[in-house]
Amino acid sequence: MKPEQPGNDEIALRAAVLAGSEAAWQVFYDRHVQSLYAFAWYRSGRRSDRAEEVVQETWLTAVRRLKAFDPARGPFDAWLKGIAANVLRNQRRRWRRDARAKALDDDNLCQEPPPPENGELIGLALTALPQRYQAVLRAKYEERLSVSEIAARLGATAKATESLLARAREAFRSIFQDLNPHD
C-alpha cells in the first residue's frame, strides 16, 4: 500500500487494534479526542460535564464496535462522530427526563421548574436536527461563513444554499420552541 492513499493509515491502525495493540488505540484516541470533545461540547449546550459523558460513552461504543468501522467507507473521525450523534440523541432524552424528575423533587412539588438556559436549549435543538441542517447552521453562525462560502463548501449554488439555510432555520425554530415552552 502507498502511504499517500486515503485511509491506509486508518486501515493499518484498525488492524493493529483488532490484533490487540493498545498503542494503536492510543493513536486513534490522541488523534480524535479533541475534535470529538468539541463536537460533543457544542451539541450538549456547551456544558463540559455533558460533553465528557458523551465522549466517554462514544469511546466505549467505539471500542465495542470497532469491527464495524470500515475505512473504505469513510474516516474514523466521521464514524466516531456518527456514534457521538446517536449518543447525544439518547442523552438528550435522559437529560430532559432528569430535568423533569428534578422539578418533581420533594422540595419543588408545588413550584414551577426553572426554565432551561438558552445555551443548553440551543445545543439540544441543534442535536435534534439532521446533520445537513446542523452543518449549514454551524457554518453560518459559528464559523461566520457567507452564503457563497457555504455554497462552495457544499458544492451547491448560492440560491440552493439560501434555501437550505431557510429550511434549517425553520426546523431549528420549531425544535427550539418545543424544547422551550416557557417563551
Image (cartoon, rainbow, N blue to C red):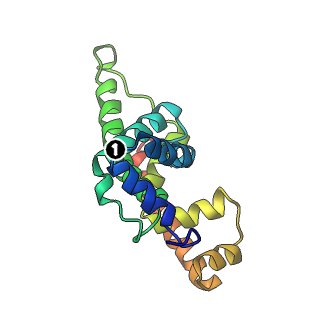
Q: Residue at 44% of width from left, 59% of height from top?
A: 12
Q: Is residue 152 left or right of residue 125?
A: right
- Specify whether residue 183 is in view: no
Considering the numbered disc 1 on the image, is that residue within a helix, a strand or a loop? Answer: loop
13 lies above or below 100 = below
- How packed mark 1 is, by other alpha carbons closer than 10 Å (few <14, some 14-19, many 20 or more), is few
Based on the displayed image, in which of its 4 quarters is residue 128 positioned? bottom left
| Count of marks, rendered view | 1
In the picture as drawn, the residue positioned furthest to the front comes out as: 1
Q: Residue at 47% of width from left, 63% of height from top?
A: 75
Residue 169 picture location, percent across and down: 53, 65
Q: Residue at 34% of width from left, 18% of height from top?
A: 108
Please name whichever residue, 29 or 45, is drawn nearer the observer in this view of the structure.
29
40 lies above or below 161 = above
Please name whichever residue, 127 or 108, is drawn nearer the observer in this view of the structure.
127
- Specify whether residue 141 is in view: yes
Residue 173 picture location, percent across and down: 48, 59
57 lies above or below 131 = above
Please name whichever residue, 49 or 69, is drawn nearer the observer in this view of the structure.
69
Kind of residue at badge 1? Gly
Based on the displayed image, in which of its 4 quarters is residue 14 positioned? bottom left
Q: Residue at 29% of width from left, 36% of height from top?
A: 97
169 lies above or below 89 = below
Q: Is residue 84 left or right of residue 42?
A: left
Based on the displayed image, in which of its 4 quarters is residue 162 positioned? bottom right
Residue 150 picture location, percent across and down: 64, 73
Q: Is residue 21 left or right of residue 7?
A: left
What residue sits right under mark 1 in the picture?
Answer: 20
Please name whichever residue, 149 or 169, is drawn nearer the observer in this view of the structure.
149
Residue 125 picture location, percent across and down: 45, 52
